[in-house]
Amino acid sequence: MAGDLREQLEGAYRRLLHPLVRILIRSGVTAPEAGELLRQVYVDAAGSDECQLPGRRLSDTRVAILTGLSRKEVHRLRNASDRGTFVSNFSRVMRVIAGWNQDPQFTGPYGLPVAIHFDDDPTSESPSFCELVRRYSGDMAPRAFLDELLRTGLAEIDVDGRIRNTGRTYIPNVLDPAAIEHLGKVLARLADTLDFNNSREPGRKKRFERHVQTDIGLTEEQYQHFSVYLQQKCQQLLETLDDWLAMQEGRIGPMKKPERLPKKKVITGVSIFHFLDRTLPFEKVESASPPQSVADEE
């Protein structure tokens, strides 16, 4: 790799790793522990299809050449039996919220999620929260699930004791398992898309990836207005895309005849994030009275 390109690559990765290492430090993960993790990721990445030789089994020697690690180290990492895994409730919460907003049994005449009682009622055809959780969450306890929705502001209990959905965006607490899972997925998918689009393979169609940013900058007041406007517009777009995907998958819309599922399913989606080159003082504490939106002012 040419010297200038290598320096640019190292600079880009340094910028990329800085916020990630900041999270590790905040979580008590030391540099030696992070180094062990990085070696493991190098070995895992060397096993990807891109690094394989056609018709050849991937050997420890080949991985050692690609990663710069010793064959002994590679063998240890490739055969490690204690790779940590965790399961969070992030995807389960998203499935339940999507079902509440898209399943005809849990939505009203205008497509809005209906208020539901917690327990099943054998004498009524009305759906229950327990049924919603069973259908879309699997084995998670309904009471614990309700506590999580109440904690994150996605549900409230009205004066009649019914549970109402109050949002579609799940934002877990900092450094809980769901937040960590979300962090890993978003950054990995963004990096994978950028890497895919940077491929020089001729004729390869690129994935959609665009961004807009200021040229000369906004005042802090303009920035606050932009933040409100951005949240409104992007939330509307994401909900529209979510409904379209739900219709393609048969989760909402006219009932389709059962079809044999393909052996390989395409997992796809869109992420939108708001970036800022530096943290502003007023971002550290939620403003008690956010500025009016552009639409409200017009």
Image (cartoon, grey):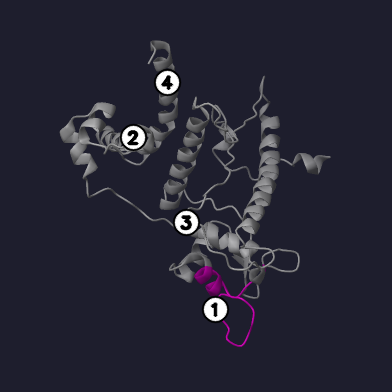
Task: Name the amino acid, label 2.
Answer: Pro
* Label 1 SS: loop
* Range covered by the magenta-colored residues: 114-135
The quadrant holding residue 23 is: top left
Question: Mark 2 and mark 3 in contact (Cβ < 8 Å)?
Answer: no
Which structural element holds mark 3?
loop
Between circles 1 and 3, the one closer to the viewer is: 3
Q: Which mark is residue 9?
A: 4
The three-letter code of the residue at mark 3 reads Lys
In front: label 4 or label 1:
4
Which mark is first along the chain, 1 or 4? 4
Q: Earlier in the sequence, mark 3 or mark 2?
A: 2
Q: Residue at x 31, y 40 (%)?
A: 28
Taking the image as drawn, is residue 244 in sight?
A: yes
Which residue position holds label 1?
119
- Residue 284 in percent (x, y) is at 54, 38
Report which quarter residue 119 is drawn in: bottom right
What residue did someone put label 2 on?
A: 54
Q: Is residue 134 magenta?
A: yes
Mark toward the viewer: 4 or 2: 2
- Type of amino acid at the residue the image marks with label 1: Asp
Farthest-out residue, top: 3
Mark found first going from the N terminus, 2 or 1: 2
Q: Quadrant of the N terminus?
A: top left
Position in image of residue 221 (x %, y %): 69, 31
* Element carrying mark 2: loop
Q: How far apart, in angstroms, are the residues tagged by discs 1 and 3?
A: 37 Å
Q: Marks 3 and 4, how far apart in space?
A: 38 Å
* In contact (CB < 8 Å): disc 1 and disc 3: no
Asked if the residue at tag 4 contacts the one at tag 3, i.e. Cβ–Cβ closer than 8 Å, the answer is: no
